[in-house]
C-alpha cells in the first residue's frame, strides 16, 4: 500500500516536472519568415538571394535619383500649378538650386545605399557559403560591378560619401571618403572585375550586368575624372567606349522610339535596362503619370488620372529642328481623347488642354498655367496602367557611347572621329549631318540633350561641360526664375539631415 | 414553479416562527425599494423600534411582521441610509436612499487577480458601476465611461459605428506601441483592446480603472498604459429573474462645413470665371454633405435570465444591436450570446466557474475616399441623371460619392469567442488554490468588391484573419486575520500563447461583376494575388502580491511580477516588475474630534510596468523575406527576390515605466462630499522606436531599439457632492479634472549591434504630415526632446501681400520656398467632466458634460477646402471667398486652431414606475448624446482621431483613416478622412420581470 502511494507520488512529481518545463520555456516558432541563418541553402535560394541587387535598381531610373539629376538641370521643371506640386517647396528647390539637407534629398541617398547595402550583405553571405556554386567568381564580379554603379551615382551626386564595401564594418566607424578616393576605388574595382563578367549579349543576359555594362560605367567614370579628381582621363574613356562600340554587339535602333516602347526588350541599342512590367515590376516606370495632364488618361486609356507635373520649357523644346523625330517625344498643343477628335478639357480650370512650352514662372495659381510646359512621352504610355508601365528603362545605350566618344575625341583633338560619331546619331534622328564647323562644345552639349532628353544624365553632363569649359551650364541662370548660383556648391547635393543624424562622423558638404 | 412554491412555503414557515410570540399584535406588510430606480431590495433588516422584533425582506423586497399599531420601524441595509418610518397602514412602501460612503465601506473592487474592499485600496484605482454610466446611443461600450474618470480620456474618432475609440489613461507612455489600457474582462486579459467593443454594453456591471503604476504593476509587461478591469453582470441567489433592456434611437450629423450652396457657387463662378459656368453647371442642386448621409436608426436589445441558489448561480443573456451609420450603406450589426455560471461543491470548498461569450459582428464598411469626393464635387452637379442612373464624372480626386457608396461593396464579419473556466478549492479557511483556463478565438473575414467606375478596373478580394490564444494560470491565495492585522497573499503562475494567421486573395478585371467577390479566380489571371502570414509568441509569468492591513488604518501592499516573453530579444527574455504602495487612514488617529470629516486616507505608491506592444513576435530576429520580383532573363519569368528585411536586435526589451503616485481620499459632511486627489510622476525609459540607421552597414534603414525616454506628470481631482438629499428630491454632482504633462526627454542612446556599441541619435523625428493637393512631403508634427509628443513645427502666417500671396514671417513662398517653422505645443492643459444627477420622486434626470481646455488641432480640412485656388472645378467654403488668400495652400500656423471645448455628452430623463404588478423594476427613459459642443474650433468636431482605426478597407489600401501619426491633425480629404460625428436621440426601457 505504502509502495503504491510512493509510486503515485513519484509519478506525479515526474509529470509535474515535465509540465513545468514545457510551461516555462519561451518558444519562438517562426512560420512565414525565415531567419537569416536558414536561407541560402539551395541553388534557387542563392539565385533569389542575388536578385535583390537588381530589385534595388528598380526605383533608380524614374525615381528620386532621376529627379535629382534632371530637375536640377534645364531639362525638367516641376512648377507649382495652383494647388498642385508645391509639396513643401521640394520641386522648386531642385530647379532653383536651393536644395536643403532636410528636404527631399534623402530619397536619392537612401535608394542608392539600399543597393550598396543589399550587395554588401549578399557578398558577405556568398563568401561564407560552405558549398559555393561553381560560378561564384562570376557572380561576385557581377555584384561588385553593379555595386560600382550605385557607388558611382552616389559619389557623383553627394560628393564626399561614406564608402562602405564590407558588410562587417562597425557602424560607428564609418567616415566620408573624398571623391578622388572613391574614384580610385571604382577604377580598381572595375578593371579587376570587368574581365570576369560575361560578354554574351542575348536574351539570357537581358537586364543583367555584362562586360559592356562595365565598360559603359568605366567610360562614365573616366569622362568625369576631371570633375572628381581634377585630372581629365579622356584617353581612358575612349578605350572603354571602344570596347563597347567595336564589340559589334550593339547597333543603333533604326527607330529612336523603339528603345523606349512598351515592348522595348528587342532593342539592339540598349546596353543596360532596368526591366519593368505592369504586373510584376511596377516600381520602376511611372513616367506617364508624372508628366501627363489629368485628362490625358482619356488619350492613352490609362486606368487612373495622371498627375500633371513634369514638363519642359521653350528653351529645351526649341533645341530641336522641326524635322527632328526626337522632337515628337514632346506633346504640344491641343490634346485629344483616344478617338483623336474629341478635344480634352481641364474640368477644374475649364480650359482646353493645350500644352504650351512657355513656363514663365515657377509658381502660378491660374488655370492656364496647368497646361504650361511640354510633356514627354519618350516612354510611351501604356493602356490599362496608371503608373507601373511595362517599358523597360534605359541606363546605358549605344547612342550615349557614340556621343561620349565624340566628346572625348574632341578633347583629345580627334575631331574626325567626333564628327562621325555625332552624325550617326543625327542621321537616325532625321536631321542634317553636321559639318566640322558645327562641331563645338556647346553644340555637342545640345546634341546630348536632344538625344538623351530626360534620361537621367543631364546634371552630370552640364557639370562636366562646365568644369571643362568654364561656362555656367549648370550653375547659371535659366527661365523660369533661376538666378546664377554664384558658386559651385550646388554641383553636389547636401548630405541629408537624417544621415548626419544617424552618423555623427559625417560632415556637411561645403556651402550648405 | 416548483422553486417558487418552495420559496413561499419557507417564507411562510419563517413568518410563523417570528410571529408566534406576538399573536396579539397587528400584521404589517410592505415593500422596500431603492429610491432611485424603484428596484426592490432583498435582505433589508426591519426592526420595530426599541424591540428585538424584526424581519428581513424577501427577494422581492417584501416583508411582513407583527408590530404594534403605533411606533416606528427601523429600516437598515448596508449601502443605504438608515431610515425610521412610523408604522402606518399596510402595505407600507419604504424607499431607501443609497449612500455612497456606506457603499464604499463594502464596495468590492477588482485589482487584478483578486478583489479588495474599496476602502482598503492603496493604489489609484477608480470604480465605476452601471448606475453612473453614460446612457443612450453608444458606439463602443467604453463610451459609458467617457468623462467619468479623472485621467481617462476617451475619444470617439467620429461617427463611424465600425471604428474603435481612442482610449488614453494618464497620457502617452509609448511612441510606437498602442496607447490603449489593457482590458481585463472577468479576469481574462483581452488579446487586443479592440475586442472590447464586441462586448455588449448592457452586459457590463462595473469598471475598475487601475491608474497608477503601483496598481497596474500586477500586469507587469503589459501594464504600461494602465488597466481597465471589466466585471460583467452575474446571477444572484434567489428567484430567477428576466431582464430586458431595450433602446431605439436616431442619429444625425452634428455639424457641417459651410460650403457654397448651388446658387452661391453659380454666382461666384459667374463673377470669377464667367466662361466656366456652362462647363461646371450641370443643372444640379446638390448639397453633397447631405447627399451622402441620412438619419440613421439604431436599436439595441438585451434579454437576460439570471438566478441561483446558495450554492450556484447563473446568468444567460442574448444581445442584438443594429446600428446604421449616418453615411449611406454603412452600419454595424451585432449578435452576442453570453453564459456565466458558478457552482459550489464538496461542502462549498470547491468553487467552479464557467463562462462563454460569443459575439458575431457584421460591418458594412465605408470607402473613406468618398469624403474627399464629397468636398470636391461642385454643388451644381446632380446626383443622378433624369433617367435615374448615376451622374458619373471624374477628375483628380473627384467622382460621384453617392455612386461609390452605392456600388462599392465592403463587408467585414468578426466572430469572437471567449471561453473560460476556473476551479478554486479551499484547503483551509485561509488557504485556497485554483486554476483558470481561457480560450479565445477571433476570426475576421473581409469581403470587398470595387466596381469599375470612371474607367478604373474592377477589383475583388477576400481576407481572413485569426487571432487565437490559449491562456491559463495556477494561483494560491492566503487570507488570514490575526488580531487587528489582516494578511492577504496571492501567488500565481501564468501561461499565455498567442497565434495569429491571415490569408488574403485578390484579383481584378471581372467580366461578371454580379458575382462580387465570390469567384475570385475568374478575373484576369495575370493579376491574381495571394498572400498569407502566421506568427506565434508566448508570455510566461510569475506573479505575487502581499497585502497587509493593521486595524483598517495602516495598509501596505507589495507586488512582484516576473514576465518572460518570446517577443523580446533572446539575450534577456525575463524582467521583474515590482511595486510597493501604502495607505494610512488617519481619521481615527488625528482627526477623531473633527466632526465634519468622516474619513480620510493618504496613499503613496511606486511601481514598474512594461510594454511590448511595439514588438512583433519576430522583430528581434534578422530575417530574410521577399523584397520584390525580378526579371529572370534565362526563363523570362518574374521570381521573388529574397533579402534581409530587418536588422536584428537580440537585446530588444520592454519599454519600462517607473511610476510614482500620491493620493488623498476623503469623505466629508456625513458623506455629502467625497472625493480624491492624485498626483503622479511617471518616467518611461527604454522607449521603443524605429530609429534611423545608416545603410550600409545596416541592412535596412531603421532598427527597432530601446532608446529614449519620456515623462508624464499630472494631477487628478475627483469630487462628488450630494447637494440635496431629501427623500423626495435629490441632487448630486460629480466632477473630475485632470492634467497631464507629457514630455519626451531623450531620443538618444546606445545599442549593441553586431557585437559593437552604436550610438543612435535623433534630434527630431517627423511624424505627422499636412496633406492635400500640392502638399506632399510636408511634415508638421515631430517627436522632439524637450517637447510633448507631436509638437507642431509650422511657419508663422503673417498675412498676405497686395496680390493675395501669403507671407510667412514677412516673406512670400516665391521669396523663400521653404519657410522656417516655429514649435507650438498642441497638448491640452487639462481635461474635465462633470455629471449632474437629479431625482425627484419617480423622475430622474442626469446630464454629463465633458471638456478639454487648451488643445490645438491642425485644421487640414480647411487648409485644403478653404482656398479659392480650388475654383472653378471644386467647391470651397464661404470663408475662402473673403479670406484674401489667392495663392496655393501652405501648411502654416494659420490652420492650427484652438480646440478647447465643452460637450454635453449625454442627458437622460427617466421615469421609474413603482408597484408594477408584473415587474420588479420598470424604467423608461429618453436620452440624448452629443447634444451640443461649445468650441471655437472650425472643424466638424474638436475631437479628432488619434489612433489607428480598425475598419476601412484593408484589401485595397483605402483604409485612409488615421494612425498615431495623425495626432492633432484633422482629416484632409486627400489621404485621411473623417466620418462625421453624430448627434443621437434615443428612447429606452429597462424592465425586470417578476
Image (tube, coloured by chain):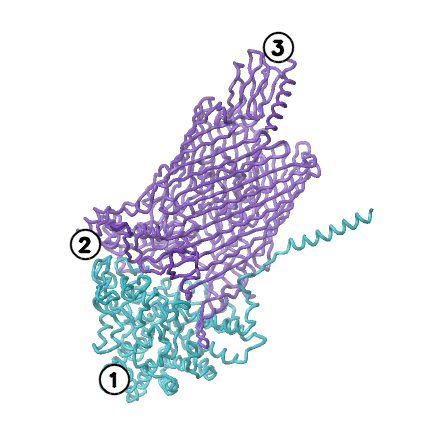
* Residue position marked by numbered label 1 in the rendering: A439
Closer-to-camera residue (B955/B117): B955
Q: Quadrant of residue B574?
A: bottom right
Label 2 sits on a secondary structure element that is helix
Question: Residue A219: percent from the left, percent from the top?
Answer: 38, 81
Q: Mark 3: give few (<14), some (14-19) or many (20+) Cα within 10 Å.
A: few
* Residue position marked by numbered label 3 in the rendering: B24
Q: Quadrant of residue B483?
A: top right
- Residue occupying image coordinates x 23% and y 72%: A315
The purple one among the chains is B
The mark that comes first in sequence, 2 or 3, is 3
Question: Residue A238: percent from the left, percent from the top?
Answer: 36, 86
Q: Chain of mark 2?
A: B
Residue A358 in sight: no
Label 3 sits on a secondary structure element that is loop
* Residue position marked by numbered label 2 in the rendering: B278
In the shown orientation, is residue B526 left or right of residue B476? left
Mark whose residue sits in front, 3 or 1: 3
Amino acid at each position: 500500500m505504502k509502495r503504491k502511494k510512493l509510486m503515485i507520488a513519484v509519478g506525479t512529481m515526474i509529470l509535474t516536472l515535465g509540465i513545468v518545463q514545457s510551461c516555462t520555456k519561451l518558444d519562438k516558432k517562426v512560420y512565414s519568415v525565415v531567419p537569416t541563418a536558414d536561407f541560402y541553402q539551395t541553388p534557387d535560394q542563392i539565385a533569389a538571394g542575388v536578385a535583390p541587387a537588381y530589385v534595388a535598381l528598380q526605383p533608380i531610373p524614374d525615381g528620386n535619383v532621376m529627379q535629382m539629376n534632371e530637375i536640377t538641370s534645364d531639362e525638367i521643371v516641376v512648377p507649382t500649378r495652383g494647388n498642385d506640386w508645391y509639396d513643401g517647396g521640394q520641386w522648386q528647390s531642385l530647379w532653383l538650386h536651393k536644395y536643403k539637407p532636410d528636404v527631399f534629398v534623402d530619397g536619392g541617398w537612401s535608394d542608392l545605399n539600399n543597393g550598396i547595402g543589399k550587395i554588401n550583405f549578399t557578398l558577405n553571405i556568398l563568401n561564407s557559403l560552405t558549398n559555393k556554386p561553381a560560378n561564384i567568381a562570376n557572380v561576385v564580379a557581377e555584384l561588385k560591378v553593379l555595386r560600382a554603379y550605385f557607388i558611382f551615382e552616389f559619389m557623383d551626386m553627394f560628393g564626399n560619401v561614406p564608402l562602405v564595401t564590407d558588410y562587417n564594418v562597425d557602424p560607428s566607424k564609418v567616415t566620408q571618403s573624398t571623391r578622388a578616393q572613391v574614384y580610385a576605388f571604382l577604377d580598381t574595382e572595375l578593371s579587376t572585375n570587368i574581365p570576369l563578367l560575361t560578354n554574351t549579349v542575348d536574351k539570357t543576359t537581358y537586364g543583367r550586368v555584362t562586360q559592356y555594362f562595365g565598360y559603359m560605367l568605366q567610360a562614365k567614370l573616366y569622362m568625369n575624372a576631371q570633375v572628381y579628381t581634377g585630372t581629365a582621363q579622356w584617353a581612358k574613356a575612349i578605350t572603354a567606349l571602344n570596347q563597347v562600340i567595336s564589340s559589334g554587339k550593339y547597333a543603333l535602333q533604326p527607330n529612336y522610339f523603339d528603345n523606349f516602347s512598351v515592348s522595348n526588350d528587342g532593342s539592339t541599342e540598349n546596353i543596360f535596362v532596368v526591366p519593368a512590367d505592369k504586373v510584376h515590376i511596377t516600381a520602376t516606370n511611372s513616367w506617364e503619370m508624372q508628366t501627363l495632364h489629368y485628362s490625358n488618361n482619356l488619350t492613352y486609356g490609362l486606368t487612373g488620372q495622371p498627375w500633371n507635373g513634369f514638363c519642359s520649357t521653350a528653351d529645351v523644346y526649341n533645341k530641336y529642328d522641326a524635322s527632328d523625330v526626337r522632337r515628337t517625344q514632346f506633346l504640344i498643343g491641343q490634346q485629344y481623347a483616344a478617338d483623336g477628335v474629341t478635344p480634352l478639357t481641364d474640368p477644374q480650370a475649364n480650359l482646353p488642354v493645350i500644352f504650351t512650352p512657355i513656363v514663365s514662372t515657377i509658381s502660378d495659381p491660374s488655370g492656364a498655367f496647368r497646361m504650361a510646359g511640354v510633356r514627354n512621352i519618350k516612354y510611351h504610355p501604356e493602356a490599362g496602367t496608371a503608373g507601373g508601365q511595362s517599358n523597360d528603362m534605359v541606363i546605358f545605350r549605344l547612342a550615349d557611347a557614340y556621343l561620349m566618344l565624340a566628346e572625348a575625341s574632341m578633347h583629345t583633338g580627334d575631331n574626325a572621329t567626333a564628327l562621325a560619331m555625332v552624325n550617326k546619331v543625327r542621321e537616325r534622328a532625321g536631321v542634317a549631318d553636321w559639318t566640322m564647323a558645327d562641331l563645338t562644345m556647346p553644340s555637342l552639349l545640345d546634341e546630348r540633350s536632344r538625344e538623351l532628353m530626360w534620361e537621367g544624365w543631364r546634371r552630370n553632363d552640364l557639370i562636366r561641360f562646365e568644369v571643362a569649359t568654364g561656362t555656367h551650364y549648370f550653375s547659371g541662370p535659366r527661365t523660369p526664375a533661376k538666378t546664377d548660383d554664384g558658386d559651385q556648391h550646388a554641383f553636389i547635393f547636401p548630405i541629408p539631415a537624417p544621415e548626419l543624424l544617424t552618423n555623427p562622423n559625417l560632415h556637411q558638404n561645403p556651402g550648405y | 414553479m416548483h422553486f417558487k412554491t418552495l420559496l413561499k412555503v419557507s417564507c411562510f414557515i419563517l413568518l410563523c416562527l417570528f410571529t408566534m410570540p406576538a399573536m396579539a399584535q397587528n400584521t404589517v406588510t410592505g415593500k422596500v425599494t431603492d429610491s432611485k430606480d424603484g428596484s426592490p431590495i432583498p435582505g433589508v433588516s426591519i426592526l420595530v423600534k426599541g424591540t428585538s422584533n424584526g424581519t428581513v425582506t424577501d427577494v422581492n423586497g417584501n416583508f411582513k411582521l407583527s408590530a404594534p399599531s403605533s411606533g416606528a420601524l427601523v429600516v437598515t441595509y448596508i449601502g443605504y441610509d438608515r431610515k425610521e418610518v412610523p408604522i402606518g397602514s399596510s402595505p407600507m412602501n419604504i424607499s431607501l436612499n443609497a449612500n455612497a460612503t456606506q457603499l464604499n465601506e463594502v464596495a468590492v473592487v477588482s485589482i487584478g487577480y483578486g478583489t479588495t474592499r474599496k476602502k482598503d485600496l492603496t493604489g489609484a484605482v477608480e470604480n465605476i458601476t452601471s448606475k453612473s454610466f453614460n446612457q443612450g446611443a453608444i458606439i463602443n461600450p467604453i463610451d459609458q465611461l467617457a468623462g467619468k474618470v479623472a485621467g481617462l480620456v476617451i475619444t470617439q474618432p467620429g461617427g463611424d459605428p465600425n471604428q474603435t475609440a481612442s482610449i488614453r489613461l494618464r497620457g502617452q507612455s509609448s511612441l510606437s506601441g498602442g496607447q490603449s489600457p489593457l482590458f481585463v474582462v472577468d479576469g481574462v486579459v483581452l488579446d487586443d483592446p479592440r475586442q472590447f467593443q464586441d462586448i455588449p454594453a448592457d452586459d457590463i456591471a462595473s469598471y475598475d480603472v487601475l491608474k497608477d503604476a503601483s496598481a497596474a504593476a500586477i500586469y507587469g509587461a503589459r501594464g504600461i498604459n494602465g488597466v481597465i478591469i471589466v466585471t460583467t453582470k452575474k446571477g444572484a441567489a434567489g428567484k430567477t429573474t428576466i431582464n430586458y433592456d431595450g433602446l431605439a434611437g436616431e442619429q444625425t450629423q452634428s455639424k457641417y462645413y459651410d460650403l457654397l450652396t448651388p446658387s452661391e457657387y453659380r454666382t461666384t463662378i459667374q463673377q470669377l470665371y464667367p466662361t466656366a459656368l456652362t462647363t461646371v453647371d450641370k443643372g444640379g442642386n446638390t448639397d453633397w454633405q447631405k447627399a451622402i448621409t441620412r438619419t440613421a436608426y439604431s436599436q439595441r436589445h438585451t434579454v437576460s435570465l439570471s438566478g441561483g441558489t446558495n450554492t450556484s448561480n447563473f446568468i444567460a443573456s442574448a444581445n442584438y444591436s443594429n446600428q446604421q451609420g449616418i453615411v449611406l450603406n454603412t452600419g454595424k450589426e451585432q449578435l452576442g450570446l453570453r453564459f456565466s455560471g458558478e457552482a459550489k461543491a464538496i461542502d462549498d470548498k470547491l468553487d467552479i466557474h464557467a463562462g462563454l461569450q460569443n459575439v458575431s459582428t457584421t460591418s458594412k464598411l465605408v470607402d473613406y475616399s468618398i469624403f474627399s469626393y464629397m468636398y470636391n464635387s461642385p454643388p451644381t452637379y446632380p446626383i443622378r441623371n433624369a433617367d435615374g442612373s448615376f451622374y458619373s464624372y471624374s477628375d483628380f480626386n473627384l467622382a460621384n460619392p453617392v455612386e461609390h457608396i452605392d456600388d462599392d461593396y465592403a463587408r467585414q464579419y468578426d466572430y469572437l469567442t471567449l471561453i473560460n473556466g476556473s476551479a478554486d478549492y479551499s484547503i483551509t479557511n485561509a488557504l485556497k488554490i485554483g486554476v483558470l483556463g481561457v480560450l479565445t478565438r477571433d476570426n475576421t473575414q473581409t469581403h470587398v468588391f470595387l466596381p469599375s467606375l470612371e474607367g478604373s478596373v474592377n477589383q475583388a478580394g477576400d481576407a481572413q484573419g485569426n487571432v487565437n490564444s490559449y491562456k491559463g494560470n495556477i494561483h494560491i491565495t492566503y487570507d488570514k486575520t490575526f488580531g487587528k492585522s489582516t494578511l492577504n497573499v496571492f501567488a500565481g503562475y501564468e501561461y499565455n500563447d498567442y497565434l495569429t494567421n491571415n490569408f488574403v486573395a485578390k484579383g481584378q478585371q471581372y467580366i461578371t461583376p454580379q458575382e462580387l467577390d465570390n469567384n475570385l479566380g475568374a478575373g484576369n489571371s495575370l493579376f491574381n494575388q495571394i498572400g498569407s502570414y502566421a506568427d506565434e509568441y508566448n508570455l510566461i509569468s510569475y506573479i505575487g502580491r502581499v497585502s497587509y492591513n493593521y486595524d483598517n488604518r495602516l495598509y501596505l501592499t507589495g507586488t512582484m511580477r516576473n514576465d518572460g516573453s518570446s517577443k523580446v530579444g533572446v539575450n534577456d527574455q525575463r524582467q521583474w516588475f515590482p511595486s510597493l504602495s501604502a495607505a494610512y487612514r488617519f481619521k481615527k488617529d488625528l482627526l477623531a474630534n473633527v466632526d465634519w470629516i468622516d474619513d480620510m486616507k493618504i496613499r503613496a505608491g511606486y511601481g514598474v510596468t512594461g510594454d511590448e506592444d511595439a514588438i512583433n513576435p519576430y522583430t528581434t530576429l534578422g530575417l530574410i523575406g521577399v523584397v520584390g520580383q525580378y526579371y529572370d532573363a534565362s526563363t523570362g519569368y518574374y521570381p521573388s527576390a529574397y533579402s534581409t528585411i530587418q536588422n536584428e536586435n537580440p537585446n530588444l526589451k520592454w519599454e519600462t515605466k517607473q511610476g510614482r503616485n500620491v493620493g488623498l481620499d476623503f469623505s466629508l459632511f456625513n458623506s455629502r462630499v467625497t472625493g480624491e486627489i492624485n498626483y503622479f510622476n511617471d518616467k518611461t525609459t527604454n522607449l521603443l522606436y524605429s530609429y534611423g540607421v545608416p545603410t550600409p552597414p545596416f541592412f535596412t534603414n531603421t532598427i527597432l531599439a530601446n532608446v529614449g525616454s519620456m515623462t508624464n506628470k499630472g494631477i487628478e481631482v475627483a469630487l462628488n457632492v450630494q447637494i440635496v438629499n431629501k427623500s423626495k428630491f435629490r441632487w448630486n454632482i460629480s466632477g473630475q479634472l485632470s492634467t497631464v504633462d507629457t514630455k519626451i526627454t531623450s531620443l538618444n542612446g546606445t545599442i549593441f549591434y553586431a557585437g559593437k556599441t552604436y550610438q543612435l541619435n535623433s534630434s527630431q523625428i517627423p511624424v505627422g504630415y499636412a496633406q492635400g493637393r500640392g502638399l506632399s512631403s510636408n511634415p508638421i508634427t515631430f517627436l522632439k526632446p524637450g517637447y510633448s509628443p507631436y509638437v507642431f513645427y509650422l511657419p508663422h502666417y503673417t498675412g498676405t501681400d497686395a496680390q493675395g500671396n501669403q507671407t510667412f514671417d514677412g516673406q512670400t513662398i516665391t521669396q523663400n520656398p521653404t519657410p522656417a517653422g516655429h514649435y507650438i505645443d498642441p497638448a491640452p492643459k487639462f481635461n474635465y467632466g462633470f455629471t449632474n444627477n437629479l431625482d425627484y420622486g419617480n423622475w430622474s434626470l442626469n446630464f454629463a458634460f465633458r471638456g478639454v481646455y487648451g488643445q490645438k488641432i491642425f485644421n487640414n480640412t480647411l487648409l485644403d477646402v478653404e482656398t479659392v485656388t480650388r475654383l472653378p472645378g471644386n467647391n470651397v467654403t464661404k470663408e475662402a471667398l473673403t479670406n484674401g488668400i489667392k495663392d496655393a495652400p501652405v501648411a502654416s500656423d494659420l490652420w492650427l486652431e484652438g480646440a478647447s471645448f465643452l460637450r454635453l455628452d449625454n442627458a437622460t430623463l427617466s421615469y421609474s414606475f413603482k408597484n408594477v404588478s408584473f415587474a420588479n423594476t420598470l424604467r423608461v427613459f429618453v436620452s440624448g448624446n452629443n447634444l451640443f459642443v461649445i468650441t471655437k474650433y472650425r472643424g466638424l468636431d474638436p475631437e479628432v482621431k488619434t489612433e489607428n482605426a480598425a475598419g476601412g478597407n484593408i484589401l485595397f489600401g483605402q483604409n485612409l483613416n488615421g494612425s498615431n501619426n495623425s495626432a492633432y491633425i484633422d482629416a484632409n480629404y486627400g489621404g485621411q478622412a473623417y466620418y462625421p460625428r453624430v448627434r443621437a436621440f434615443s428612447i429606452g426601457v429597462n424592465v425586470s420581470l417578476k
